Amino acid sequence: MADGNHCMYFVERKKRFCRMTVREGRRYCGEHQRDVAGPGPDAGDERVPCPLDPTHTCYRSKLTRHLGVCNAKRRLDARPAFVVEGANLDAETIAAPPRVPLSQLDESVVGTVIRKIHAAYGTIEFKNPFRFRVSLSLSLSDMSLSEKLPEFSRTILRHDVLEDKLSDETCGRNVRKHLLQNASLLGHLEQAGLVRDDTCFVEFGAGKAQLTYWLGQIIKNKSNSCILLVDRSSHRHKSDNKLRREESRLVIKRVRVDIADLQLNQIAEIQPIKYKVGIAKHLCGTATDLTIRCLVKSMNDEPKVDVRGLIVAFCCHHKCEYSSYVGREYLRQCDFIADEFPVLCSIVSWATCGSRPAALKSDVNSPRHLPAQEIASQSSRSDERESIGRKAKTLLNWGRLVFLESVGFQAELLYYTSLDVSLENMCIVATRERSL
């Protein structure tokens, strides 16, 4: 029970009373006073969310004074010129379709999206339409497909700069997986002709900068080279600090900013460098689209940035948002509507969720076993779900490729590593010869 000096509001989530102290004669603290209804000592002046930072509130009568001293205002005033809220968001206001779990949707809704996924690959011809059930997915024996999208090459490369590290037998399995992915991405970066003098490499969603570290080993002797790291979070044990301690002419800058708010052409340190190249490894769905928007916008706004290419390894397609997705026009051409986008983004999880029938995972000594025929049937359906999920992922990636080609890039989708290294094994390599 709260005493007279502390807030009487019961915080349901924490199963206890609020521990904030209260003013004399009051029962509730400032934050919880807005939740109090009816007459009493705590009724009166209304608490409203702060316009600068809605995570806290203030009295309406004191709002003007609060805006002058709010900590959020100080942060906004200190914000650099290259940070502009919503700079890379679509100017067109698009209402985000609601996300509903697939299990709560009508089977016909999910079935329609699945048919459109297959239709984007080829023409579906159902041999037995009455057998179709969403719960059982699509049986490959019930349809014939004529592929429309091309076959994507599996091009797994290595780079000399990582050979010694990959030969180190003390590297654990997880470390080696990341090294193999970095080696292939850097190999593709060099093969695409993007490693050259007078270039600034921008790593979006840099994290601890492990990809940047190995890139730095490649370009540290290049003239007028720079690496810009972009991440909205702060990380410990960053590899770019290690790179800075090494002797080289390489300029390294890290900025803490949301990609949605980044104006790349306003960063003074990279303006003298002629070419820009974007790189990213396992960039989450929405961040991938914001990265593409950021680069394209910097090519068109003054001062214009000469973006020569980008390499992005995709990840987390289920986190894509319709309002920021760059391939909306391509999806419209495939007859998808806005309300079907969340369903499409839910289906992509079938490719990586690793779901298998419980009987296939159970212990061999378990008394509960399904007949072998039933296990085989469930395994087959699970494989079909995975196939549909991968097609959905590829569809979203292809929409991005179409967008990049529409703004002057030559782009290619490919598998840069094997599935046993990463289930998210597709990347896009895009190059651009000259400014438009």
Image: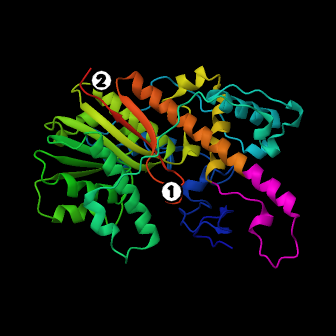
**Which mark is first along the chain, 2 or 1?**
2
Q: Taking 309 as reference, is 366 left or right?
A: right
- Residue range of the region highlighted in magenta in the rendering: 353-382
Q: Taking 206 as reference, is 2 left or right?
A: right
Counting from the top left corner in percent of width and height, residue 37 is at 70, 48
16 or 161, which is in the foreground? Answer: 161
Q: Which residue is mark 2?
A: 300
Instruction: Report the number of discs.
Output: 2
- Where disc 1 sits, the SS reads loop
Counting from the top left corner in percent of width and height, residue 238 is at 31, 63
Q: Amino acid at mark 2?
A: Asn
Badge 1 local density, few (<14 within 10 Å), some, or many (20+)? Answer: some
Q: Taking 378 as reference, is 253 left or right?
A: left
From this view, report whether residue 38 is shown above or below residue 324.
below
Q: Which residue is mark 1?
A: 422
Q: Is residue 321 visible?
A: no
Quadrant for the C terminus, please.
top left
Counting from the top left corner in percent of width and height, residue 280 is at 37, 47
Q: Amino acid at mark 1?
A: Ser
91 or 315, which is in the foreground? Answer: 315
